[in-house]
Image: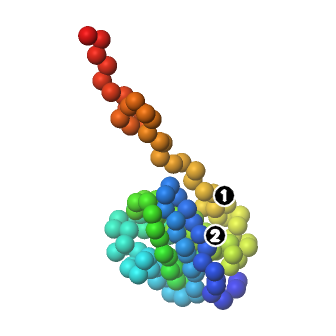
């Protein structure tokens, strides 16, 4: 395992959110936009989702995570952090690629919000039909 800091932050994306993630060897301190993970993401479920790649590889207490996130909402940002951490782990140790790949941590979730169509109030919703 390499013990050097990743110089270039790795990018993770989900919905409209983009996360730049840096991993440094440390004690497991997670910082998101200058706040603690729970302070920024607000919900335990989102923190667990964001740190899923570290939990899957049993490296939660081996690395410090510094993430800068922009765009989207908290759920998308947690997913973006998760992908960024997974990519950074693979950059640190190539042998983790199999575990993270099988867990789906390295795959970009391509689901996006469907666009609004003209002549209706939303993507799927229609205005009420009146026969008379």
- For residue 63, what is the image quadrant? bottom right
Residue drawn at point x = 70 percent, y = 85 percent: 2
Residue 104 seen: no
Q: Nearer the viewer, mark 2 or mark 1?
A: 2
Which label is found at residue 87? 2
Residue drawn at point x = 30 percent, y = 24 percent: 128
Q: Describe residue 25's horizontal placement relative to residue 132 as left or right.
A: right
Residue 27, position in %: x, y? 50, 87
Is 100 rendered above or below residue 114?
below
Number of numbered discs visible in the structure rendering: 2
Is 25 rendered above or below residue 100?
below
Residue 64, position in %: x, y? 52, 83
Out of 127 and 76, give the one closest to the viewer: 127
Which label is found at residue 43? none
What residue does disc 1 label? 102
Residue reaching furthest to the front: 118
Instruction: Tell me the quarter of the image containing the C terminus.
Output: top left
Q: Describe residue 8's horizontal placement relative to residue 124 as left or right.
A: right
Mark 2 secondary-structure assignment: helix
Residue 94, position in %: x, y? 73, 73
Instruction: Tell me the quarter of the image containing the N terminus.
Output: bottom right
């Amino acid at each position: 395992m390499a013990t050097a800091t990743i110089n270039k932050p790795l990018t993770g994306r989900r919905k409209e959110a983009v996360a730049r993630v840096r991993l440094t060897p440390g004690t497991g301190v997670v910082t998101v936009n200058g706040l603690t993970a729970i302070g920024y993401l607000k919900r335990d479920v989102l923190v667990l989702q964001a740190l899923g790649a570290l939990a899957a590889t049993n490296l939660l207490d081996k690395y410090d995570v510094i993430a800068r996130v922009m765009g989207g909402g908290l759920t998308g940002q947690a997913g973006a952090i998760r992908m960024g951490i997974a990519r950074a782990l693979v950059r640190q140790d190539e042998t983790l690629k199999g575990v993270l790949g099988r867990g789906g941590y390295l795959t970009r979730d391509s689901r996006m919000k469907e666009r609004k169509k003209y002549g209706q109030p939303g993507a799927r919703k229609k205005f009420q039909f009146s026969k008379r």
